[in-house]
Image (cartoon, helix red, strand yellow):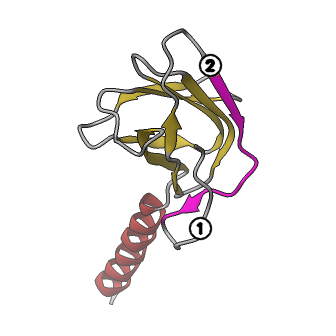
Amino acid sequence: MRIKELSSIVFVLILVAINLWGQGTQGGLVGTIRDEKGAEIFGAKVRVANVGTGLQRETTTAGNGLYRALALPTGTYEVTAEAQGFATTTVKDIEIGVDQTRTLDLALRVSARAETVTVQANADLTQTENSQTGRSHR
């Protein structure tokens, strides 16, 4: 009888541990960087910075203009995208919550000189886990 009780307790503890392990405190940000005409920009540098902690992640867009910044701790972020021949664009106040992967698409303006465009983002972004719609910053 003791072995059955001990086995049941171990089994319950394993289930609890697996459940806790699956719950994360991180989120992510994905999107596409395009020019004003809608063409994807390859090799654009995207920097994602947590305003509260100073944590920064940098990534580069793929051939189809896609970028991904995953495993981001929850918090408020600022996203900056830049590419040669384009004005640097910054979007502020991007909220990343627990287990949320947000979508933020950006359109960069062609610019022959160094130029920065800043967008204040108080809008809801796309919540990819439950199909909520958001806004695209262009």
Please determine whether, in this image, residue 86 is positioned above or below residue 78: above
Q: Nearer the viewer, mark 1 or mark 2?
A: 2
The range drawn in magenta is: 117-128
Residue depicted at x 53% and y 48%: 104
Q: Tell me which residue sits at (58%, 43%) in the image.
A: 138
Tell me which corner region of the image, top left, top right, bottom left or bottom right, holds residue 18. bottom left
Image quadrant of residue 88? top right
Label 1 crowd (10 A; few <14 / some 14-19 / many >=20): few
Residue 18 to residue 84: above or below: below
Confirm or deny contact between disc 1 and disc 2 (CB under 8 A): no
Depth check: give the residue in front, 133 or 100.
Answer: 133
Using a 10 Å C-alpha cutoff, classify the residue at mark 2 as few (fewer than 14 neighbours), some (14 to 19) or many (20 or more).
Answer: some
Magenta stretch holds residue 76: no
Q: Residue at x 37, y 69 (%)?
A: 14
Secondary element at tag 1 = loop
Task: Name the spot of residue 10 as percent of width and height, x first.
Answer: 36, 72
Q: Residue at x 45, y 70 (%)?
A: 16
Q: Is residue 131 left or right of residue 134?
A: left
* Label disc, if present, on residue 133 of the rendered structure: 1
> Residue 99, image x and y in percent?
52, 58
